[in-house]
Image (cartoon, rainbow, N blue to C red):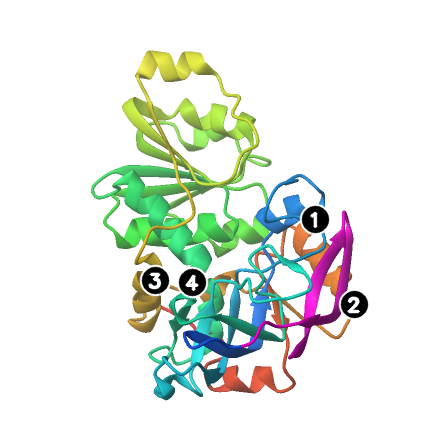
């Protein structure tokens, strides 16, 4: 079976082209994609050739943020799944191209274990938020935030969701720093600081934080944040870092603990899905931009990679895909 897919052909070269899908096995499902999104972390690094290792071997299909409708299932898969929307974490089901997650395709063949069915969410487009929501949830779990003061550096998509989840999980106070106005405005932090226009020391004066969560990847920002941690405080590295280079003296003087968060843990996708379904997590606030795959796809990726106001770019694969969201266009979840 043939399908259109987004292919990173080489460094800084993106194409929408035809690929060949592997046959649907007895334990697979075939998903017709309605929406996918762009990772501004991993995919940006791969686009610039900064991850020269498997699975990012050119040419490859990116994408681990995909929602579509199940249109076929294998012989050993429950037939009742047909017609349901599902989040797809990616696929290696291609014959003629490598898959670096592989979710940016018109049709996706993947094991049934790779999907998360979205039948309890009124707006299935919200499933796009599952991987970043699960990443943020894992970060907050590692931080053990209940009754603690938490400082979150950066209000990109993961940072914004981490703030909401920290509050939901009982943090005493959540503060956030972010240099871009629109991102800071989208945050639900109790205390918001713009380091470009405010004196961070003055804004955070009188506060000693138990936990520092970084979602910036900027070492100078982490160094600044360390000054506000209490003795025996904890730092959670919530991004992906090529190298760690921080002021060790602060870690030494305060006997700080450092934890690296890797993606999400087993069960976190389902937990986030339930939080969205129960109207406890506002997923759609990170959906800021949209683009159809038939238009200039490179333009969409470059905007997602470079525009600080673009928290999450939604790619529309199917004509009429917007119709599914008209009855609940915001996928608004109360705080």
Image marks 4 and 3: residues in contact by CB distance under 8 Å: yes
Q: Earlier in the sequence, mark 1 or mark 2?
A: 1
In this rendering, position of residue 83 left or right of residue 167: right
Gap in angstroms between the C-alphas marked 2 and 4? 26 Å
Q: How would you classify the magenta stretch by its main secondary structure? A: strand
Q: Earlier in the sequence, mark 4 or mark 3?
A: 4
Q: Earlier in the sequence, mark 2 or mark 4?
A: 4
Distance (Cα) linking label 3 and label 2: 32 Å
As measured in the structure, the alpha-carbon distance from the residue carrying label 4 to the one carrying label 3 is 6 Å
Does the segment drawn in magenta span residue 8?
yes
Q: Which mark is residue 130?
A: 4
Mark 1 or mark 4, whichever is nearer to me: 1
| First of labels 3, 1 by sequence position | 1
Sequence-wise first label, 1 or 4:
1
Camera-near label (1 vs 2) is: 1
Q: CA distance from mark 3 to mark 1?
A: 29 Å
Query: How far apart are labels 1 and 2 at the CA level?
Result: 16 Å
Residue that mark 2 sits on: 296
Q: Which mark is residue 259?
A: none
Which of the two residues, 13 or 298, is positioned nearer the viewer here? 13
Q: Quadrant of the N terminus?
A: bottom right
What's drawn in magenta, residue-wise? 1-23
Identify the element where label 2 is drawn.
loop
Percent coordinates x, y for residue 114 in the rendering: 42, 66
Per the image, the residue denoted by label 1 is 47
In the structure shown, which secondary structural element does the residue marked by tag 1 occupy?
helix
Q: Residue 12: horizontal and vertical position, in percent?
A: 77, 49
Residue 239 is left or right of residue 136, and the answer is: right
Residue occupying image coordinates x 31% and y 48%:
166
- Between disc 3 and disc 1, the foreground one is 1
> Can you give x and y, in whole percent of width and height, for residue 90 in the image?
52, 63
Which residue is at 30% across, 26% downward? 233
């Amino acid at each position: 079976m043939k399908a259109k897919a987004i292919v990173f052909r080489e460094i800084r070269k993106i194409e929408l082209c035809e690929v060949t899908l592997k046959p649907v096995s007895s334990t697979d499902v075939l998903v017709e994609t309605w929406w996918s999104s762009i990772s501004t972390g991993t995919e940006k690094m791969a686009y610039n050739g900064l991850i020269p290792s498997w699975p990012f071997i050119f040419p490859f299909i990116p994408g681990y943020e995909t929602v579509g409708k199940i249109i076929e299932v294998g012989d050993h898969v429950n037939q009742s799944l047909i017609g349901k929307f599902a989040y797809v974490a990616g696929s290696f089901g291609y014959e003629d191209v490598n898959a670096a997650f592989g979710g940016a395709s018109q049709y996706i063949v993947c094991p049934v274990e790779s999907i998360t069915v979205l039948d309890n969410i009124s707006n299935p487009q919200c499933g796009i938020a599952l991987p970043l929501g699960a990443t943020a949830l894992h970060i907050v779990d590692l931080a053990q935030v209940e009754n603690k003061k938490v400082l979150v550096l950066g209000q990109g998509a993961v940072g914004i969701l981490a703030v909401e989840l920290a509050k939901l999980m009982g943090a005493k106070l959540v503060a956030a720093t972010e240099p871009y106005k629109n991102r800071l405005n989208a945050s639900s932090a109790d205390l918001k600081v713009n380091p470009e226009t405010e004196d961070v020391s003055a804004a955070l004066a009188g506060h000693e934080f138990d936990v520092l969560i970084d979602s910036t990847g900027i070492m100078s920002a982490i160094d600044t944040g360390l000054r506000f941690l209490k003795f025996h405080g904890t730092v959670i590295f919530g991004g992906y870092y090529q190298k760690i280079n921080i002021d060790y003296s602060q870690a030494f003087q305060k006997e700080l603990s450092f934890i690296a968060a890797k993606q999400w843990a087993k069960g976190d996708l389902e937990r986030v899905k339930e939080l969205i379904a129960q109207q406890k997590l506002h997923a759609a606030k990170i959906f800021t931009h949209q683009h159809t795959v038939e238009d200039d796809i490179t333009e969409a990726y470059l905007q997602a990679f470079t525009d600080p106001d673009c928290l999450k770019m939604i790619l529309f694969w199917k004509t009429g895909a917007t119709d599914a969201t008209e009855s609940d266009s915001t996928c608004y979840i109360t705080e």
